[in-house]
């Protein structure tokens, strides 16, 4: 049966979402709620491990041995894991070997070849284990030195809660090796190895959404005149990179330098934390966002228009003077799960709806993003009325990114109030501060790539040096998926601090497949502002209920 005309146009509007929600993983991470009570975290450990076991294949590697473990018990007093073990074989093992064979990327499930349950895998690499009896083994949390998990793995919050992994960073030598998000990935050369650090033009999932992207990257060796990294396509998508540029800034060590979303640079030397930070219901979250400590707030309260919001107050000593609001944040792992579930509502018609929506403008797409809380929205209270002032573009979930929101002098007054809004658990917020210090002169240099050698031997330096019609293409059906980029002639000054900002421009086109029927009635709701956030909350409640039941 064909769609009625009204329904048809509603669903065409909805499909904008496929091209905007970017660079997130297909699983979620535990984030403490506003109570932050250790006893509550402890009490949830058993149910979290049970939920993870019930929905994934848990596999241990000890030397050349590989076993599936089940009936898992986590001893909270000794941080010891005990479990029954059996051979890991069949279709899940076949899928695992497919991943190993293409170690530089991700093995994606094909509907006709493998079941979803086969590809939901978590692999724990351990130094050894103790044989308790004929079938049960035990090992310490500290025996785990590496964690691999498939893109389809779910409910990994148990690993975060018990400290086995932490956020998206590499913690205690444990790496998430083939759970990588969409959009181009950046691996930095730290002098010893390539480390996954960030992503490029996150969320630019269509040519209309191509944009400039600015991210600070660590300066591993300030005495070196060169810097290198790799741009890698590890997802089922085509990636088109227009420009890659490195900006080096020399400045005094007591000053920090950050950019806004447009690449403008700001010197920051006197950050002030808010005196108050509360959810809409009045619950204080100040301890989450008053320091840059990776202790993040997850926007998990219901608020206006379906979005989650927090209110911030600053006790300023000045007014009528330009200020810079600094936000340190990243996208959440949970939002990847929400995005995938949303995509699945289109079923087998996913590709068709995306094709039909190719002519939607950037303005239309971004309007939908704002209404659904995909971007981080920043409001200022002026004359007792809220004004949407600015927004933070998607940054991905690989690293916390620091973004400046410049505030015009006419809006700066004593006891300033800000409101930050987003979808339910779409962002993690680590810090918000404001700075009124005078801007200083900065020694800024912009560097084009000295070389950009693809794994097929081609040099893409020309394609990456200019904002033009030439693109470096990492496409799905080609062997080229990695390019090593080198910058040289960086300034060196032992009396100054050096800050590096990576500028990129481009877009990418996902090529994921979905199956099943199109759930049109559910999709119609997503024309309403905040519906994606409400959808996220509904999914989260379902997950929590299942965890409680187990």
Image: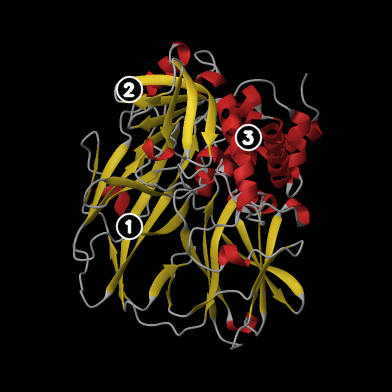
Residue 419 horizontal side relative to residue 72, left or right: right
**Of the residues under marks 2 and 1, which one precedes in the sequence?**
2
Q: Is 389 drawn above or below residue 28 in the view shown? A: below
* Quadrant in the rendering for residue 438: bottom left
Residue 433 in percent (x, y) is at: 54, 72
Q: How far apart, in angstroms, are the residues tagged by discs 1 and 3? A: 47 Å
Which residue is tagged 3? Answer: 47
Given this view, does label 1 or label 3 mark the residue nearer the observer?
Answer: 3
Which residue is tagged 1? Answer: 245
Kindly identify which numbered label has been placed on residue 101: 2
Q: How far apart, in angstroms, are the residues tagged by discs 2 and 1? A: 33 Å
**Of the residues under marks 3 and 2, which one precedes in the sequence?**
3
Please, what secondary structure does the residue beneath circle 3 have? helix
Q: Is residue 325 visible?
A: yes
Camera-nearest residue between 125 and 431: 125
> CB under 8 Å between callouts 2 and 1?
no
Kindly identify which numbered label has been placed on residue 451: none
Q: How far apart, in angstroms, are the residues tagged by discs 3 and 2? A: 34 Å
**Of the residues under marks 1 and 3, which one precedes in the sequence?**
3
Q: Is 59 drawn above or below residue 163 in the view shown? A: above
* Quadrant in the rendering for residue 60: top left
> CB under 8 Å between callouts 3 and 2?
no
Residue 537 in percent (x, y) is at: 71, 43
- Dot 3, crowdedness within 10 Å: few (<14), some or many (≥20)? some
């Amino acid at each position: 049966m064909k769609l009625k005309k009204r329904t048809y146009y509603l669903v065409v509007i909805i499909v904008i979402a496929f091209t905007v929600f970017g660079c997130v993983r297909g699983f979620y991470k535990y984030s403490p709620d506003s109570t932050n009570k250790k006893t509550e975290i402890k009490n949830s450990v058993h149910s979290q491990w049970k939920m993870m076991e019930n929905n994934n294949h848990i596999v241990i590697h000890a030397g050349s041995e590989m076993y599936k473990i089940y009936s898992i018990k986590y001893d909270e007093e000794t941080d010891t894991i005990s479990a029954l073990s059996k051979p890991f074989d069949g279709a899940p093992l076949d899928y695992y070997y497919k991943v190993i064979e293409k170690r530089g990327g991700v093995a994606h499930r094909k509907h006709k070849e493998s079941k979803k349950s086969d590809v939901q895998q978590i692999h724990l690499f351990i130094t050894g284990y103790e044989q308790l009896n004929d079938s049960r083994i035990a090992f310490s949390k500290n025996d785990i030195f590496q964690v691999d998990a498939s893109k389809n793995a779910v409910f990994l919050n148990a690993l975060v809660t018990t400290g086995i992994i932490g956020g998206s960073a590499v913690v205690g030598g444990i790496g998430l090796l083939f759970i990588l998000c969409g959009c181009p990935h950046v691996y930095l050369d730290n002098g010893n190895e390539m480390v996954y650090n960030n992503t490029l033009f996150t969320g630019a999932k269509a040519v209309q959404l191509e944009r400039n992207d600015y991210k600070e990257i660590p300066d591993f060796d300030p005495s070196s005149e060169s810097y290198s990294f790799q741009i890698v396509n590890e997802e089922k998508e085509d990636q088109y990179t227009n420009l890659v540029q490195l900006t080096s800034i020399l400045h005094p060590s007591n000053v920090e330098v950050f950019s806004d979303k447009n690449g403008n640079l700001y010197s920051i030397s006197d950050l002030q934390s808010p005196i108050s930070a509360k959810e809409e219901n009045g619950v204080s979250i100040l301890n989450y966002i008053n320091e840059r400590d990776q202790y993040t707030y997850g926007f998990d309260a219901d608020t206006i228009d379906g979005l989650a919001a927090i209110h911030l107050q600053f006790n300023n000593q000045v007014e009528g003077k330009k200020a810079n609001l600094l936000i340190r944040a990243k996208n959440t792992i949970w939002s990847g799960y929400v995005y995938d579930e949303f995509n699945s509502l289109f079923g087998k018609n996913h590709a068709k709806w995306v094709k039909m929506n190719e002519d939607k403008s950037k303005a239309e797409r971004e309007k939908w993003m704002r209404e659904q809380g995909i971007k981080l929205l920043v409001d200022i209270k002026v004359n007792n009325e809220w004004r949407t002032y600015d927004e933070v573009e998607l940054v991905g979930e690989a690293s916390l990114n620091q973004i400046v929101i410049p505030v015009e002098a006419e809006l700066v007054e004593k006891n300033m109030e800000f409101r930050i809004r987003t979808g339910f658990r779409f962002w993690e917020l680590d810090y918000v501060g404001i700075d009124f210090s005078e801007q200083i002169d900065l020694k800024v240099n912009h560097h084009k790539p000295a070389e950009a050698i693809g794994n097929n031997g081609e040099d893409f330096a020309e394609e990456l040096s200019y904002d033009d019609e030439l693109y470096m293409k990492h496409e799905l059906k080609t062997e080229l998926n990695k390019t090593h980029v080198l910058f040289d002639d960086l300034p060196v000054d032992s009396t100054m601090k050096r800050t590096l900002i990576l500028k990129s421009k481009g877009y990418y086109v996902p090529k994921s497949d979905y199956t099943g029927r199109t759930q049109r009635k559910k999709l119609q709701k997503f024309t309403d502002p905040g519906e994606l956030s409400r959808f996220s909350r509904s999914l989260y409640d379902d997950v929590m209920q299942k965890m409680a039941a187990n």
